[in-house]
Image (tube, grey):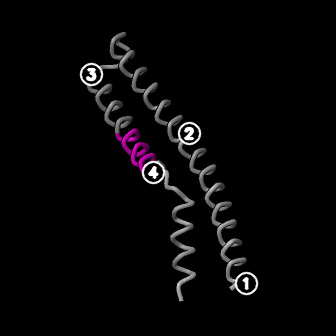
Amino acid sequence: MCRSRKLLEIFRLVVRDVNANQGKHLTAEKKDILNRIDTLNNKLSKARGLLLTDGVDLADCRIMKSQIEEEITREEAKLSVVTVSVRNIEQLLDNAGNALEKP
């Protein structure tokens, strides 16, 4: 029984470490996606500005707007996948530990 408790504690340490590393990766990925969305929104603003200053005609502006909005939608979809609800890892580990200890 003592050996199984040691293995369970090792399991918990490994899971905590993996969870922490994954969290760091997801945070960086989320930041990158948000930066891309911000850049796309800036492009959209520039396209509107060009329309106002007669730099482009209405048809070209609509095409640019549509393409940029499609890219923003794709990035927002990626963001929704990356944005994971925070779970209580300790509760999950307790549940896993209890399941492993059952005969």
Residue at image position (46%, 35%) is 37
To which residue does mark 3 refer? Answer: 58
Residue 71 is covered by the magenta coloring = yes
| Front of the two marks 3 and 4 | 4
Residue 75 is covered by the magenta coloring = yes
Q: CA distance from mark 2 to mark 4?
A: 16 Å
Quadrant for residue 22, please give it: bottom right
At label 2, counting other C-alpha atoms closer than 10 Å, the crowd grade (few under 14, some 14-19, many 20 or more) is few
Kind of residue indicated by mark 2: Lys
Q: Which residues are magenta?
A: 70-81
To which residue does mark 4 refer? Answer: 85
Residue at image position (35%, 19%) is 48
Q: Can you say which quadrant of the picture contains the C terminus?
A: bottom right
To which residue does mark 1 refer? Answer: 3
Say which label, 3 or 4, has the lower sequence index: 3
| Front of the two marks 2 and 4 | 4
- Image position, residue 55 (x, y; %): 38, 15
Task: Check the image and name the residue furthest to the front.
Answer: 1
Q: CA distance from mark 4 to mark 1?
A: 34 Å
Numbered mark located on residue 31 in the image: 2
Say which label, 1 or 2, has the lower sequence index: 1
Residue at image position (66%, 75%) is 8
Find out whether the residues at labels 1 and 3 contact each other: C-beta distance under 8 Å. Answer: no
Task: Check the image and name the residue furthest to the left.
Answer: 59
Say which label, 4 or 1, has the lower sequence index: 1
Say which label, 2 or 4, has the lower sequence index: 2
Q: Is residue 1 left or right of residue 71?
A: right
